[in-house]
Image (cartoon, rainbow, N blue to C red):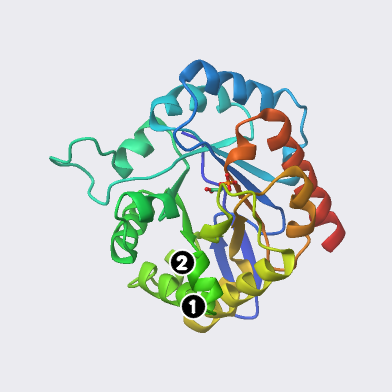
Amino acid sequence: MKPFPVWKHSNNDGEIDMPLSNKIPLIAGNWKMFMTIPEAIDLVNGILSEHLNLQGSEVVVLPPFTALRDVIKLAADTPLQVGAQNLHPEDRGAFTGEVSGPMLRDVGCTYVVVGHSERRQLFGDTNAGVNRKLQAALSQSLLPILCIGETKDEREGNRTLEVIQKQLEECLAGLDSSKVNRVIFAYEPIWAIGTGLTASPEQAQEVHAFIRRIIAENYGNTTAACAIILYGGSVKPDNAFSLLKEKDINGALVGGAALKPDSFVEIIKEAIKAYKEKQ
Ligand code: PGA
């Protein structure tokens, strides 16, 4: 499997090891339940053949379990990283149909998504369950992408920040800052996922800044300053720049637009451009 990157961050409190830097954007493509193995291979070849300067970005694809092995082989000597979309909290056992953290390590994953809203809404994932999955991922040195976000009703009822705070506190329960340093956050308003509706850059920035503030309050300023907070929900080539230009938006978790090499690569390029502008 690929070695995990380590990035040293120094400040007045000393030096901490971070798995990644938020000085470059992280773009992750969540393929959901799409892509047979041949389709997955075509998509990855398409992404890689764009002669993309992946140096200015961290790019991750999240194929379905069945395509992981082939995609990991294809990405082996490239900067492209690969992760899974879910894991079971236990390492092994009689859990028919499930896949564990050690199995994801075994196949060569670096990342894993936990708490995606589709899993919360359709498969009963709760904050407490997501917390267990997060701990399982961290115990295997996988980099978890923790998804949080409000429903349309919660936003219209002015409860967005309250919901986000509760999700953060319950999902991160029991983790200290050395663990939280390894968590990648993804703010995904549920009303924006797969709907074509996107949070405005201002709406997204407000929630991202709030997430960073909660992290600072609970885990310290260094952890908060280094945190990678992605935005997800109908990210497309034409809105990626304005979203990524916001101060606290460090990347994107992309669904539909990650299924075609052109649109995915375009989003990566827009993200790199936006980062250059805000530095
Ligand atoms: P979308 O999905 O980009 O298709 O809205 C995002 C996600 O579910 O992570």
What residue sits 55% from the left and 55% below the top?
A: 19
Examine the image and state in which quarter residue 199 appears.
bottom right
Q: Amino acid at mark 2?
A: Val
Residue 61, placed above or below residue 206: above
x, y percentage for residue 2?
Answer: 51, 36
* Dot label at residue 219: 1
Distance CA(mark 1)–CA(mark 2): 8 Å
Q: Relative to 212, say whether 149 is above or below.
A: above
Instruction: Give the camera-side residue of 177 and 119.
Output: 119
The spot of residue 134 in percent (x, y) is 37, 58
Classify residue 55 as left or right of residue 113: right
Q: Is residue 233 left or right of residue 246?
A: left
Q: Dot 1, crowdedness within 10 Å: few (<14), some or many (≥20)? A: some
Q: Which element carries disc 1, helix, strand or loop? A: helix
Placement of the C terminus among the 4 image quadrants: bottom right
**Residue 270 is at least partly visible in this image:** yes
The one of 218 and 267 positioned closer to us in this rendering? 267
**In the displayed structure image, the side of residue 206 where residue 159 appears, left or right:** left
Residue at which label 2 appears? 180
Q: Secondary structure at mark 2?
A: helix
Residue at 59% from the left image edge and 49% from the top image edge: 195
**Label 1, ligand 1: CB separation under 8 Å:** no
